[in-house]
Image (spheres, rainbow, N blue to C red):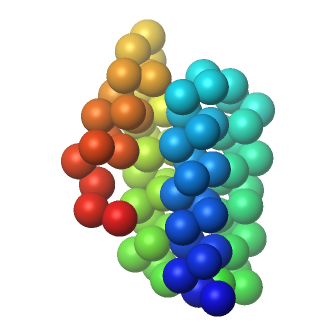
Amino acid sequence: MQEFTYRDLIERTKYAIKSNNRDLVCETHGAACMARELGAISFDQYFKINAVLIRCYLNGGAHRKEKALKQIEKTEW
């Protein structure tokens, strides 16, 4: 179950970033927070998703989509 939830969140993260939709990014971050609170994903898994969504996209400035996509490519999921 944990691996399925994590893979689903990864796909949601990629879709939210590629769609360049702030609402989807925030919704995906909320889903990741909830999964972490419920123990469905580990802290390390949550941190990887959080790094892409918050650090690279929401705090990324003018080129946030490009920064987030580069982070997705660099991350070992």
Residue 5, quarter of the rendered image = bottom right
Instruction: Judge from the rendering whether residue 74 lies leftward or rightward of residue 50; answer left or right.
Output: left
Instruction: Tally the marks.
Output: 0
Residue 59: horizontal and vertical position, in percent?
47, 31
Q: Position of residue 66 (x, y in %)?
A: 37, 22
Q: Compared to 66, does 1 lie above or below? A: below
Q: Is residue 35 left or right of residue 7?
A: right
**Residue at 72% of width from left, 85% of height from top?**
38
Residue visible at 29% across and 34% down?
70
Q: Quadrant of residue 48?
A: bottom left
Quadrant assignment for the C terminus: bottom left
Closer to us: 54 or 19 = 19
* For residue 67, side relative to residue 38 (left or right): left
Q: Position of residue 67 (x, y in %)?
A: 34, 28
What is the residue that sits farthest to the top in this orientation? Answer: 62
Quadrant in the rendering for residue 68: top left
- Residue 6 to residue 17: above or below: below
Residue reaching furthest left?
74
Q: Residue at x 36, y 45 (%)?
A: 72
Quarter placement of the N terminus:
bottom right
> Compared with residue 6, is residue 20 higher up or lower down, i.e. above or below?
above
Let me know if residue 39 appears in the view: no
Question: Is residue 17 in view?
Answer: yes
Q: Position of residue 76 (x, y in %)?
A: 27, 62
Query: Which residue is found at the position 62% from the left and 64% from the top?
Result: 8
